[in-house]
Image: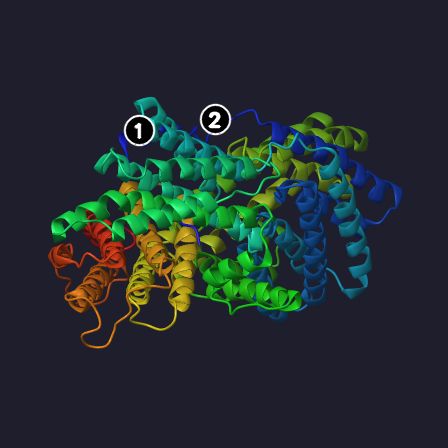
Amino acid sequence: MVQTSVAVTSAEEADAQPRRRPEWVPQWSVPSAYRALRTVLVVPALFALTFEGFGNLQIALFAAFGGFASLVLANFGGTRRDKLIAHLGLAVTGSIALIIGTAVSGITALATIVTIPVAFGIFFAGVAGPNAAGGVTAALLAYVLPVASPGNASMIPDRLAGWWLASVVATAAVLLLSPPAAGDRLRAAAGATARAYADLLDALVQGGATQSQRAAAVAAKHQLMVTFASTPYRPTGLATADQGLGSVVEELEWCGVLITDAIDEDSDFPEDRELLAAVAAVLKQIAALLGGADITPRIEAMEQLRVAGCERQRASDAHTPDDALAVARRAFHEQAIAVAVRAVVADAMIATRRADPETIAARRRGWYGAPPEGTAAERRVAALHGAVGVLARHASLRSVWMLNAIRGSLALAAAVLVADLSGVQHGFWVVLGTMSVLRTNAATTESTALRALGGTVIGFIVGALLLLGIGTSTAALWVALPIAVAVAAYAPGALPFMFGQAAFNVVVVVLFNILIPVGWKVGVLRIEDVAIGCVVSLAVGLLFWPRGAGAIVGDDLADSYRRGAAYLTESVNWALALRPTPPTGSAAAAITAGIRLDEGVRGFLAEQGSKRVSPEDLWRLVMASTRLRLTAYSLASLRPEHACAPQPDGAEPPGMAETRVLLARTAGNLAEFYDQVALLVGRPVANQVIAPLRAPSLDDLEQAHRHAHLLWIRENLHHLASRAPVLTEPAARIAEQRRQPWWR
């Protein structure tokens, strides 16, 4: 649905780009401090209660690691209700994984085979939304610990007791000890952007926008897109409200493009100031709605003015094609902005759970290609069908989630096999080492593996020195445990990866010496085990996905352009009344391609190391694919009842039939151009010869008939085609990079 659109489109946005903190520099983090506090209060207390109080090793082990999984590895956001649901889901998923892992742990071949579907399912479930993605590592730990540890079915009740004890206490700690909610950052950023656009339009209506007002709108849009793109996975899920918020982000970005283009191309609006003022008023209501106000944006006045503008264009006394085109061009931007804002209203109502069933049904058909809904029960079924449909569309080798799930499950299965066959004392650490360093390509996996080993060595040295200083005194170890837990819990996101790895190793050294006092040797064993896990992860990366997300981004770009081109062609034919049904199927396919592209770009940017593909080239192409799809959406949604459908010979004005043919042909030329872009950026084919990319010609559009509906279609196509030439060079450079060996 939503493209990640943080491209630098102007010098103003370039200046607004924040500088990233070097990864090796620690930083103060309030959320990390709260996480450390919760973990210190919960994990040592649970371990003491279950080990010293209950005297049950299995309950103690799974309570300690379960608490660490729920409080440190899991990362859930949203309201308290959202967090409660997420923790409940993690508890249930972890229980199932724990039972399966324990049941198959005694048979090497069975454990290896079963690991593939279990790990794949957990990895792939992250596509459901940010909280699902935030619980993947924690759920994997619930499977990895029992499958790679000695055990039998009789231990399942004790292990479940430890896991559920940790889940209940950790959930209570999260709900009671969390920093003050900052609100929904994405929704707040969307509201601020709508407000900035409204202020800019008000200034235009009053005679012209100042540079500071324009800069404020640019900064607001940039902050919105940075907020949306700031996570390695989409900050919206499969729920209807989540999909609505995702569409709001996309459509507000589109509004910004239209407003900027309107200012650049024609800053004088002699005929449509009233319409722009009405649009600004609606944007202010959208901002209030997203800010939590109990308000329903009213679009009646805006729609009346928009229709009046169309009628005024239709009744224009322009007698020449040039005059008619001039009138249409002046009205185009205002009309397009109004249409975009109308879409924002519908999706904002859905995102804030205030939309009526009819609005939700109409928008869902656009998101999922779902059939019309009737009763409440049928709507619930359709919603489930739509969500399942999105999951099914991710079941593609062009989906980062699919490829990550395949690679991750194979790597963990290989680690289970190697751990069992090698006979290491604690096979769990081999699998955990694999899971810790697994990244999306061979190069970044190698980098992370080196840092993981470095952190493990540092942690071993610190742990060994600690043990040399305090010996194996149980009392001293109990004092050291909460300190080590606090550092390990604070580290994620605030301290460098190596520091976090070292802190976790100290926790392990202290924890296992409380269980079985063996001194510093446990640290040496863990270094060996993690080294084996790193080698497994690196080998799988080399074999299955050496290029990482960089390759999938090119494939997803190509798919997005192809689907968008098909959507454009069908939308133009629908707007021209040359096809009887709206392009619902092609719209759903284009949306799916957009989702996969968004995930691919996020995965690519999350990879460490230098990027062979220029970020500027990548974002320019991503933005162009978004504009292609949204133009098709605009054309598909604007077919009026009085659309100029073909009439019997002699029953329509002279030239209209010819104009209709020209517009359809121009749309076809545009679609062919975008197909050529897809061919360039897509997967290389042996002995493939690609002709130089040429922008489509606009000559056919200059003689368009003056009928208002045809001129509207003409202006949409002209607006899209006029930006096509900027794609030739970035597409050619990405094509050149894609045709080089992966190791270069």
Is the image coloured rainbow, by chain, by secondary structure, or in one colour?
rainbow
Q: Is residue 292 left or right of residue 471?
A: left
SS for callout 2: loop
Residue carrying label 1: 12
Q: Is residue 695 visible?
A: yes
Query: Could you tell me residue 515's position as x and y percent?
Result: 77, 43
Identify whether 249 is placed above or below 589.
Answer: above
Farthest-out residue, right: 53
Residue at (72%, 42%) from the top-left corner?
512
Mark 1 vs mark 2, foreground winner is 1
Q: Nearer the viewer, residue 162 or 699?
A: 699
Residue at (52%, 46%) from the top-left corner?
348
Residue 25: mark in rendering? 2
Which numbered disc flags the more N-terminal residue, 1 or 2?
Answer: 1
Disc 2 marks a residue whose amino acid type is: Val
Q: Is residue 700 left or right of residue 351?
A: left
Query: Could you tell me residue 442's position as x and y percent?
Result: 39, 52
As measured in the structure, the alpha-carbon distance from the residue carrying label 1 to the one carrying label 2 is 28 Å
Query: Could you tell me residue 433's position as x and y percent?
Result: 55, 49
Q: Is residue 516 visible?
A: no
Identify whether 410 is placed above or below 258.
Answer: below
| Marks 1 and 2 close (CB-CB < 8 Å) | no
Residues packed near mark 2 inside 10 Å, few (<14), some (14 to 19) or many (20 plus):
few
Residue at (59%, 52%) from the top-left corner?
132
Identify whether 596 is placed above or below 472.
Answer: below
Disc 1 marks a residue whose amino acid type is: Glu
Q: Nearer the viewer, residue 487 or 300?
A: 300
Image quarter where the N terminus lies is bottom left
Residue 67: mark in rendering? none
Query: Could you tell me residue 65's position as x and y percent?
Result: 70, 46
